Structure formats: C-alpha cells, structure tokens
Amino acid sequence: MKKGFILFLTVGLIFLLAFSAGAVTPQRVAYIINGGLGDQSFYDSGQRGIDRIEEEYGIKTTTIECNFDTAKYQQSLQSAVQWNADVIFIISYGFEDLLKQYADRYPNKIFVNIDTVVQNDKNTITSIDFIEEEGAFMAGVTAGIVTKDTSLEGVNEEKIIGAVGGDEDPVVNSFIFGYEQGAHYIDEEIEVKTVYAGTWTDPVKGKQAANQLYSQGADIVFQIASLTGSGVLEAAAENGKYAIGVDSNQNGIQPGHVVTSDLKNVGDAIYSVFETIVNDEFEQGEVLEYGLKEGGVGLAIDKYTEDILSAEQIERIKSINEKVSAGEIVIERYQ
C-alpha cells in the first residue's frame, strides 16, 4: 500500500513538472512600429500577422505607431511594458539603442526585432532578418524582361529601369543591390537609375521621383518607399509606364501598370515566430533569416501580372525564382 502511494505521488509529480515546463501561450502581444499603418506595404503586412495571432489564439494585441516621431520611440517601449505585453514585435529603425536598453532591463519579456539585426548585452533580442537581395533580384529580373520587350506598350528602345527609395539606408540599399543583380542577369547592358525621395510618407515626392526617372527613359520603376511609393505607382499609370510594388501585393492598385510586387512577408514571419513561442521551440537571441526558400520574400504573380506579361515571360521568371530558391543562382548580399 505504501509503495503504491509513493509511486502514485511520484508519477503525479513528474506529470506536474512536465506540464509546468511545457509551452505557455502568451496573453498579450504588442506591435511597435517606427512608422505608421496605412502604407499598403511594409507596416500593414506586419499588422496582418498581428491580427492573425489575435484571431486564431484569442489573445489581446496592441499596435503602437510612432509615425517617425523620435519623441515617441521611448514612449512606445514604455507603453508596451506597462501594458504587460509578454511578446513585443518591434520595427526599431532609429531607436535600436533604446530597444537594447529595454531588452536588458526586462529579460523576462520576449523582444522580436523585425527587418534588422539588433543584439543586446544579454543576448535576448531575437531578430527577423529578411534577405531583401533575393526578392529584389527577382524584381530586377522582371524589370529586365520588361525593358527589353519593346512590344509592350510604353516600352522604348533604351534599356533603362529605375528605383525610388524612401531614403538611403542599408535596407533600401540591399534592395537596390539585389535589383541591379537581377536586371544584369537578364542583360548586362541594362542601366539602373535610382532616386531617393528622402521621405517614407509623402506620395507627392514619390510621384516626382518616378516622373524624373520616366523622363530619363526608364520603362519601369521599382518603389521601395512605403507610403511615398504609392506616388510611384500613380506616376506609372499617368505616364503609360510600369512599376513594381514592394512588401505587400500592390499589383491591383494601378491595374495594367504594376507588373509585380516584391513581397516581404512580415506578417507571415511574425505569425511563424509566435507559433514557435507557443510550441516551446523559440530561442531568444537568434537571428532568423527569411529568403526565397523560406517564403520570407518573393514575387506576387497574379492576374494583373498576366494582363501585362506573356505566359512565356512569366514562366521564365518562375524558372529563375526556382533556381534562386534551390541555390543554383547565388545572390550576393549587400555589405
């Protein structure tokens, strides 16, 4: 009787220990962005991941927009902590040092930095690093195919393509670096012209930058400028030219003129990382890389693309995409 009772207690204790060591679903998730929602691009993509977490797991979420106001950067971190967020997904451009300080100060909270690599002293920040060069390479491949096809309405004899960046920073330069490689994979003689708008929130300046490139002979312009980039898409339609969207699928914004979009699946990455937390597979301090193979980046090929490009051209793009994913074509990273 005594032995049986001891055995019962032992089994019960093991069960309790196993249960307590298992995965625990966080109850509050915060999404901090240095910019603002409504860009139909990068930040909105991330929000879709947050919305999916809330819907599928039934937990509380909050989104804190800084709208590029530096005075709000520390406030946003403090607000997330005071709200008792268990997990904080953060796009920390411009306040990386503040993120490091808060991660060191609150090691019991999970900080996941998005789109850049940030490492703190206690090595508790996990970073989602997108391989922009791979997606941009495919955008360059598409642009190269367009500028060489003079049968397309609006394409001239010159082999010139363009890009509009919101500002000159390492991430935008990574896009442009990959874009150039993709264009030159199609034809070494293709000229790539770039204009930096100097803002992420002004469609008028994006339109002006695109008009400048179109006037210089560009047949197609890749927008890498968040909300500013909506002006690029508008300029493409007004000039009877072509554009490539970024981060989210923007093909339908100006039908007949947006050939494809270079997707950065921020929302999918956020949801994927949250799943590892729930499944007790998450490791703090890791740098998680998302490229073509992982589905972190890629092209939006849909009916709008099919209305512009031929089936043969689309098949060529998909074939090159498969070779990049398989490692048969190696894309150089921006340093």
Image (cartoon, rainbow, N blue to C red):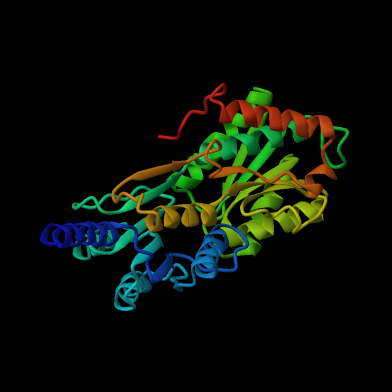
Q: Residue at x 52, y 35 (%)?
A: 177
Residue farthest to the front, as pictured: 1
x and y, in percent, of residue 279 in the image: 40, 54
Q: Nearer the viewer, residue 27 or 171?
A: 27
The answer to which quarter of the image holds residue 155 is: top right
Q: Is residue 205 left or right of residue 305?
A: left
Q: Is residue 231 left or right of residue 16?
A: right
When the figure is inspected, residue 241 is found, relative to residue 81, above or below; the finding is: above
x and y, in percent, of residue 322 in the image: 63, 29
Can the viewer see residue 207 in this picture?
Answer: no
Q: Is residue 13 left or right of residue 289?
A: left
Q: Nearer the viewer, residue 255 or 265?
A: 265
Can the viewer see residue 238 in this picture?
Answer: yes
The answer to which quarter of the image holds residue 29 is: bottom left
Q: Residue at x 50, y 65 (%)?
A: 53
Question: Which image quarter holds the C terminus?
Answer: top left
x and y, in percent, of residue 321 in the image: 64, 31
Q: Nearer the viewer, residue 70 or 308?
A: 308
